[in-house]
Image: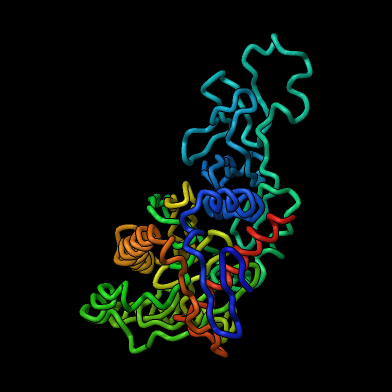
């Protein structure tokens, strides 16, 4: 198959992507209209709204959203836009509030969305507050799976569970790490990258670049006494359907759930063994082994990444132009874990995954260098992601995962455009 955007030669084992897709304003506008307005997009995790009246204000695909647990204990997604003149209603990023007041003309809304108070109400018709027109508008679709909440701006989109396809298995694996549940730890890490958003999609499920791009981190671990086991990097890549994909692999670093390293000492070994034994008793030996000893880097189309590696990160990113994106990252952990495990979990997160860690600055530099190279697209027009294309069982460091994303991307910007 060949389109203006990809060459997908399955018989010849070649897969190429036009560099124009990373630089074109026209492509960027197609993505905005055909992908981000029609796909399920990650909004937040249930743990961010633990109590009634808790809220988080978040921007999703350029739209301001209130993610809120109302006074009635129902979780909602409301457009954070006053129905009067369009001003942003809630300007705080998170907190607890029974009402939200627009600073412009003082309209007050319940945290369930209904208009509660209207300044100068006697100047309006008696039935002005009746009906829904003066309330905060709900997002057309809001659904959740395993505590992960998604929204869609297209009310006719397929149910979330159907859309998630094979990625549900891996969200289940994360949710099963604790009988008490999982939680987002702390706030949001926000940063920008001067590169096209699809480069971060590729990077997030790319096992091929680890040894070269992140050599400094691997050297650091090897030179830190007791920070590695004898486990080698090895695994497989999987196409999960609908553009979702994952690499699952073993690795030598420690995992608070539940792979011990000598640095953690004998007391740490006892605790990790207890964690593993609890997993076996609750979910069975096969699932416990998968949870404890396997790492996962997963993309849920189009722009949610869940990395369950030496720590867990949840990451979204939205294009602001063909060559720039905003990134939101969140650390996730086990509810009720010991202070000792939480300390190592967050150390692992900041050390490698966080924006100031070993990995993210390396990746940002690589992606920005790619974007710079695309200036030569007129003379060097194609990226190649053919590695492992004809392999019977693709390795985690092959490029099956990227091809899964690109096939869905191409379907949406090509076939949907024709419709």
> Which residue occupies 53% across, 51% down?
28
> Which residue occupies 68% across, 63% down?
163
Estimate the x, y position of residue 48 in percent, counting from the top left: 52, 51
Residue most toward the front?
Answer: 379
Query: In the figure, 402 relative to 83: above or below?
Result: below
Query: Which is more toward the observer, 186 or 298?
Result: 298
Image-quadrant location for residue 359: bottom left
> Which residue occupies 47% across, 46% down?
320
Query: Which is more toward the observer, 203 or 342?
Result: 203
Query: Which is more toward the observer, 26 or 311?
Result: 26
Quarter of the figure that contains the C terminus: bottom right
Q: Could one spot residue 339 in this view of the protein?
A: no
Quarter of the figure that contains the N terminus: bottom right
Estimate the x, y position of residue 119 in percent, counting from the top left: 62, 15
Q: Is residue 43 left or right of residue 231?
A: right
Query: In the figure, 186 relative to 79: above or below?
Result: below
Q: Could one spot residue 80 in this view of the protein?
A: yes
Image-quadrant location for residue 213: bottom left
Q: Is residue 122 left or right of residue 226?
A: right
Q: Is residue 391 left or right of residue 347?
A: right
Estimate the x, y position of residue 327 in percent, counting from the top left: 44, 53
Q: Is residue 324 left or right of residue 11?
A: left
The number of discs equals 0
Query: In the figure, 251 relative to 402: above or below?
Result: below
| Colouring | rainbow
> Which residue occupies 56% across, 18% down?
105
Image-quadrant location for residue 204: bottom left
Estimate the x, y position of residue 148 in percent, counting from the top left: 59, 58
């Amino acid at each position: 198959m060949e389109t203006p955007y990809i060459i997908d030669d399955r018989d010849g084992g070649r897969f190429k992507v036009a560099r124009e897709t990373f630089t074109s304003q026209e492509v960027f506008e197609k993505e905005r209209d055909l992908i981000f307005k029609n796909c399920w997009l990650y909004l937040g995790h249930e743990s961010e709204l633990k109590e009634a009246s808790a809220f988080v204000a978040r921007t999703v695909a350029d739209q301001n959203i209130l993610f809120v647990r109302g006074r009635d204990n129902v979780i909602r997604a409301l457009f954070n836009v006053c129905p009067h003149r369009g001003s942003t209603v809630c300007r705080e990023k998170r907190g607890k509030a029974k009402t939200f007041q627009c600073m412009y003309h003082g309209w007050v809304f319940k945290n369930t969305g209904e208009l509660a108070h209207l300044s100068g109400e006697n100047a309006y018709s008696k039935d002005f507050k009746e009906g829904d027109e003066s309330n905060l508008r709900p997002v057309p679709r809001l659904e959740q799976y395993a505590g992960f909440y998604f929204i869609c701006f297209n009310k006719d989109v397929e149910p979330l569970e159907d859309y998630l396809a094979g990625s549900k298995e891996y969200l289940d694996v994360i949710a099963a790490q604790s009988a008490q549940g999982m939680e987002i730890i702390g706030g949001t890490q926000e940063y920008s990258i001067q590169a096209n958003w699809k480069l971060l999609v590729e990077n997030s499920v790319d096992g091929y670049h680890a040894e070269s791009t992140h050599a400094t981190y691997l050297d650091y671990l090897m030179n830190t006494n007791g920070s590695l086991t004898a486990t080698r990097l090895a695994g497989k890549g999987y196409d999960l359907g609908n553009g979702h994909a994952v690499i699952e692999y073993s690795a030598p670093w420690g995992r608070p759930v539940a792979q011990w390293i000598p640095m953690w000492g004998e007391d740490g070994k006892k605790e990790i063994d207890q964690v593993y034994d609890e997993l076996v008793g609750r979910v069975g030996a096969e699932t416990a082994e998968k949870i404890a000893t396997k790492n996962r880097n997963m993309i849920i189309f189009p722009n949610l990444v869940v990395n369950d590696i030496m720590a867990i990160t949840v990451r979204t990113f939205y294009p602001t132009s063909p060559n720039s994106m905003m990134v939101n990252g969140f650390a996730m952990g086990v509810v009720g874990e010991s202070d000792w495990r939480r300390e190592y979990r967050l150390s692992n997160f900041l050390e490698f995954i966080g924006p100031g860690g070993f990995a993210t600055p390396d990746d940002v530099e690589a992606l920005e260098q790619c974007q710079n190279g695309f200036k030569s697209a007129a003379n060097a027009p194609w990226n190649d992601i053919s590695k492992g294309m004809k392999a019977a069982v693709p390795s985690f460091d092959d490029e099956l995962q990227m091809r899964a994303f690109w096939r869905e991307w191409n379907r949406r910007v090509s076939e949907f455009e024709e419709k």
